[in-house]
Image: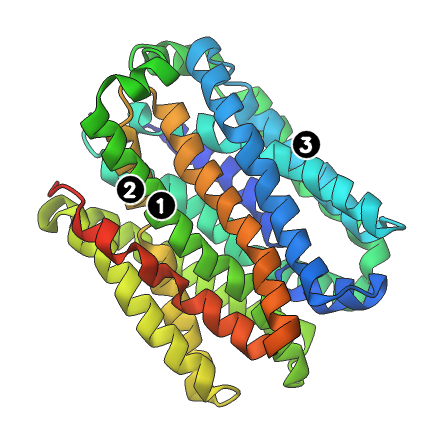
Amino acid sequence: MSISPILYLVSAAHFFNDIYMGFLTPLFPIVMGKFGLSLSQVGTISMVAAFAGAVSQPFFGMLFDRFGMAASVYLAPLLTGILISALGVAGSFPLFLVFLFLGNLGSAAFHPKGASVTPALSGRHPEIGMAVFSAGGNLGFAAGPAVFAVFVALWGMKATPVMAVPAAVVAFVLFLLFPVRDVEKKTRAATTITWRALFADRAELTVLLRLVFINFALQVGIKGMQTFLPVSMHEMAYSVTDIGIIFTVMLALGAVVSVFASSLSRTTGKRGLILGSVVLSVAVTIVGFFLMPSPLGITLIVLGGMVMNSSNPILILSAQRHSGGSPAMASSLIMGISWGLAGLVMVPLGALGEIAGIKIAVAAGIIFPLVAVVSCLRLPRE
């Protein structure tokens, strides 16, 4: 059985959902200046965005495992697009955080369902199917920094509500074309129960928790770069557009490489690729950071960030295989809890930056994934 065309619709929804998640990366210096924020408050922005996903994704995962609700595949990106696009016109920092939190709830509602329907639509190629799904989100997240940076540079922050139009269009197209009932039948057959299934087998639960911890460590590195590196680059006289393009290239390359890594994992095994993404990404990125603002430094930063993102679909698929038959719940843990906990780390990283300087904060975030090396080595061979 080949990959279903429906999967490409889901991946398209993932693209448009996650393009809004890249909104802030190049704009942190602008938001910092607009509201007069400290580095700790900048870290709070990342924390709120990630925490919304951490708090809600297990709930959404349990809800979708039990009741299906495939319509969330197109309703969630609509909610995300409308609320995130409203950030540019938020009149105060508290209102900005409210829009950000609610917009990330939409993203949180999409990811568990989108990831859980992917294996059922992938035929005999679940690794490739998950890579296609992840690549859709990664490419969207990659496009976000450049798209919003150019848009704001041309029309200003007050025009950002216009950016909700693509979300409305994709939601309408999916409403017309997405076969909700057929997808519900296919995914329900692969789903059992949620929390009880997760805790039924302690060995499987241990593997799942290790995968969540590894993803958490990688996400601290990624979010640390996305949150504080733009501020550091702004001090080096990089423009908002330059920052957006650099991060777009980094994330886009990570999305492309993740497809090849997922395919390669079928023959080489997953553990080595996950370990390699941790160790190699830290080594390349930290060298690049200390060589900035040279072209070689930027090149190494881009390559390191690419490798750091490359194992994401492998981690998701591995988590689903050790989920006790609760794929949406496992997806919510690997994509929600780990991302949310990583967001919480941004506040102390920001405080560290205020005490020791922004470069120390960025460097600390980059090397953080190394805490997961032991967990990588203790993963089973698959």
Q: Cα distance, mark 3 to mark 1?
A: 29 Å
Q: Cα distance, mark 2 to mark 1?
A: 5 Å
- Above or below for 9 versus 379: above
- CB-based contact (under 8 Å), mark 3 and mark 1: no
Task: Give me the disc on residue 79.
Answer: 3
Observer-nearest residue: 243 or 274? 274
Horizontal arrangement in the rendering, residue 57 relative to residue 306 (left or right)? right
Instruction: Write the residue at 67% across / 85% down.
Output: 237
Q: Can you identify the residue that label 1 sits on?
A: 213
- Above or below for 322 versus 268: above
- The amino acid sitting under disc 3 is Leu
- CB-based contact (under 8 Å), mark 2 and mark 1: yes
- The amino acid sitting under disc 2 is Arg
Q: Can you identify the residue that label 2 sits on?
A: 210
Secondary structure under tag 2 reads helix
Q: Can I make out residue 319 in this image?
A: yes
Q: Can I make out residue 325 in this image?
A: no
